[in-house]
Image: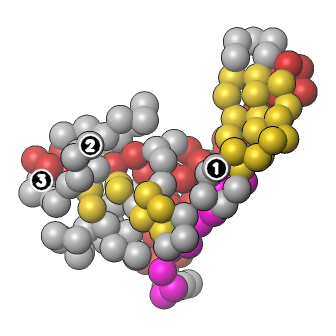
Amino acid sequence: MWAASVEPHPPAAQAGLAVDERGRALVDDHLRSLSHPDVHVVGDAAAVTVPGIGTLRMGCATALPQGRYVGRLLDGRTSEPFSFRYTVQCRSLGRRDGLLQLVHPDDAMKPTVSTGAAGRLAKAGIVTAVLAALK
């Protein structure tokens, strides 16, 4: 299922999966659809709740670990429930500026922030790491 641009698309509901009010498929702690346990759902299409953290936000910061987890689960390399914690939030603010803010495991902001060129370089490093992980 495709659900890019931080917006879930109708296929989950159209396929008959149980969804939340935003159209994201409801999943268990192994990222299986609550209504169709033979279907795994990850990324923006999934409403994932982690104990002690809450419902995860949409974005690559959560989608990539979810995809990696389901791959390991299907390969038999894990049987543990999905676990996750946040470390940073970052934003590009044009070609010459960016923002990187440290966050608590539940995504609550910490006071440590990098902006300007340092924020841009940190964001660029994260994008490079995401691209490397996808390869």
> Helix, strand, or loop for circle 3?
loop
User: Which one is in front in this view, the residue at disc 2 or the one at disc 1?
Assistant: 1
* Residue 61 position within the rendered picture, expressed as x and y whole percent measured from the top left: 60, 48
| Magenta-drawn stretch contains 105 | no
Q: Give the residue pinned by disc 3.
A: 15
Circle number at residue 97? none
User: In this view of the protein, can residue 44 be seen by the observer?
Assistant: yes
Q: Give the residue pinned by disc 2.
A: 22
The amino acid beneath tag 2 is Arg
Q: State the residue in front, 53 or 134.
A: 53
The residue drawn where x is 38% and y is 69% is 31
Label 2 crowding class (10 Å Cα cut-off): few <14, some 14-19, many 20+? few
Q: Locate residue 74 relative to residue 26 in the image: left or right.
A: right
**Magenta segment, which residues?**
79-87
Q: Locate residue 31 relative to residue 85 in the image: left or right.
A: left
> Helix, strand, or loop for circle 2?
loop
Q: Residue furthest front?
A: 111
Q: Which residue lies furthest to the top in this view?
A: 95
Q: Locate residue 75 relative to residue 47 in the image: left or right.
A: right
Q: Earlier in the sequence, mark 2 or mark 1?
A: 2
The residue drawn where x is 40% and y is 61% is 48
Circle number at residue 108? 1
